[in-house]
Image (spheres, rainbow, N blue to C red):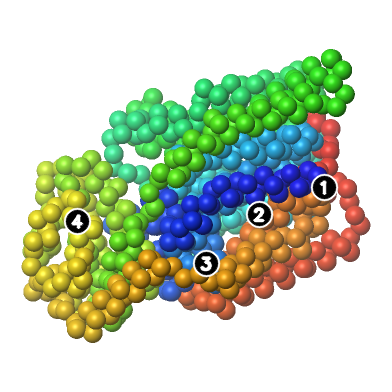
Amino acid sequence: MLFGVVILAVVGTLALVLSRQFVGDPTRLAPTRDPAWYTWRTQVLLSDEPSLLLEKEGPLNMLAGGYRITTPVVGALLNRVAGVDPYRFTILFMVGMPILTALALGAFAYQHRRDPLAFLLTMIFAFGVLLATPFVGYMDQVLVLYFLAMALPFLEPARTSWGSRSAVAMLMLLASLSHPSTTIFFSVVLAAAAGLGWLANRFSIRKTLSTYAPTVLSAAAGVVAGLAAWQLGIWGVSASFSDAVLIQPYPREFFIGRVNGWWQSFKPDYTVPLAILALGYFAWRILRRRGGDWHGRISFLWLFPMLGVFGWVLDLTYPYYRFFNTSLALLLLGGTGLWVITRGVRWVAEKVGDRWGILQTVAAAVLVLGVVSIYVRPALGRWDRESQWTSRSSRITLASVSAYAAVEPDKPIVFVIHPKADQFRAWAIAKLNSNIMLAGLAGDQAERTFVHVGTIEDLKAGRPTKTGFPVFDRLSREFLAYLQDGISRFSEPPMTFLIKGFNARYVPENNNNPGAVITPEVKLLRGPDWATPSPPAVAAAVEAREQTAQALANPPSDTGHLVRVVAGLLLLLVVPGLLASRWFGVRELPSMLALVPGLSLALGLLSAIVVIAVHRAPFGPSDGWASVALALVASLVLGLIEWRRRDRPADRVPDAAPPASEPS
């Protein structure tokens, strides 16, 4: 019980530390730029047919995501069940994911080390590293790593437990619908772990199959089901796996430069020695013929996907740095290294007669303070300094454009932007602005929204803008081709907008072009083939601007809404997993605190994906509650099945002693 109280206290402290700035400013949005992409995809799911998420690929596949659908489904569920605004669900996501992932990794360490310090040290270290640059803002990547972290405590008991096998399959399926490439890397790691077991079992196929086949086959079943969903098109449209990864057209030198910055964010001066200490401990266990276990094997083998960082050695050009966030091995190894230090102190304490374990407790406290000082505190500084994904003024401006477009529902929406031609990151700016603009509009307006990268004069003439800079010129060609193809499907002329906040920094002279002023920040541009101003639409835009500005300046305090959010979170993150916990073998308090939220989320997500696949319509309130009902029914059925079965100690997940490892 005391251990559970400590876990809750740590979780509460971490949640408070990460969320304090959002509590102080209820209008503040999530940090970094990527949440814009997830926001508009969530709004599309709420307002339009789900197939649009697959079809809205954008020029150069810049907006594509394929069946990376779990994050927008999370946002849709939070909106329909808990009343969380699509603009702000990313805050809950970015605050919650590091904590929940750290909890799952702590449970995995505790399962195999059976020491509360292994849980706490792994959890706190993992939390600190998850605030590093490779993980902040990359929401699909963080979510897939969470599902994989959740699967870890079920690997060992899956040898004998159908509940654990079903957990592994379910989590791997959802991982495949979050980020398939990372899931494939992890699947190879599992296969390699079984290969090591084959060697340890002296090439005995029978022993290896009995030990590893149930786990590996359960994971394979989940991955195959997830990848099949991509190809079969469960939401009405199939998708290519290439949609899962977008490679920017930058030279090799750019990617190499990013590698160093990402690596330094891991604090290698401290992380590498801890990892070496952990690997030494695993080697010592093998040499002492205590054998290996899932914790040691995964911690070691999951390092190998990070070798993709060294692609530059082979003169390849791709985002090498992105391989840093395909693995949680460094987090597992760092936590184990800290725990090994406390074991050493414990050994010394026993020699000097410290019967109460005071030295070990003091050592653990010092290590926690060290992790907070070296990893957590600097990361929180960056977290606080990071700008939100769009400014308050942009929200006001785009609200006015959205209101204008709502009065003209049959006309395409065109935005003109012009990143500096000599700016190396024109690609990133064009992508970011496209996502922010889509996020600022209503979800059902995304299908008719297009962007032109270049000058107004070139757009009028129907030609791309040429600057002599290859990246910019390619962007202009592809964006214009995508725009022309898109607006050709409409019978009405497009509404062509120039927004001051998206252009003033790049090409100030664009703001001098003639056009109807809709609001001080927005012009409707004039052209022979473009829509003329609509007085009712202008009035709606002005009213929306005023209302949005007022709401952001004086956000209302709504206790009832807060109660709904809390109740909705309990329903989505606690109740289903709690009802089905015995089926999955999660029975003791520490493991329940760590794993019930993830199981609940997985059951709810899977239910929502099924509901959307059947309904294939905007995800309305009835869809949200149908998803919750399906998750609760499934949980009750699983709970009743387990309740009627004989209690099997071997099925218990993190708190049971692992079976004796095979000799090495």
| Mark 2 vs mark 1: in front | 1
Residue contact between numbered discs 3 and 1, judged by CB atoms under 8 Å: no
Question: Is 511 above or below relative to 295?
Answer: below
Q: Is residue 217 visible?
A: no
Alpha carbon of mark 2 to alpha carbon of mark 3: how far? 19 Å
Residue contact between numbered discs 4 and 2, judged by CB atoms under 8 Å: no
Alpha carbon of mark 3 to alpha carbon of mark 1: how far? 33 Å
Pick out the residue farthest to the right: 646
Q: Amino acid at mark 4?
A: Asn
Tell me the residue that label 1 is attached to: 1
Residue 659, percent from left and from top: 83, 36
Alpha carbon of mark 2 to alpha carbon of mark 1: how far? 21 Å
| Mark 4 vs mark 2: in front | 4
Disc 1, SS:
loop
Sooner in the amino-acid sequence: mark 2 or mark 1: 1
Q: Is residue 420 visible?
A: yes
Residue 388, percent from left and from top: 39, 52
Tell me the residue that label 4 is attached to: 503
Sooner in the amino-acid sequence: mark 3 or mark 4: 3
**Mark sitting on residue 598:** 2
Q: Which residue: 59% across, 50% down?
A: 15
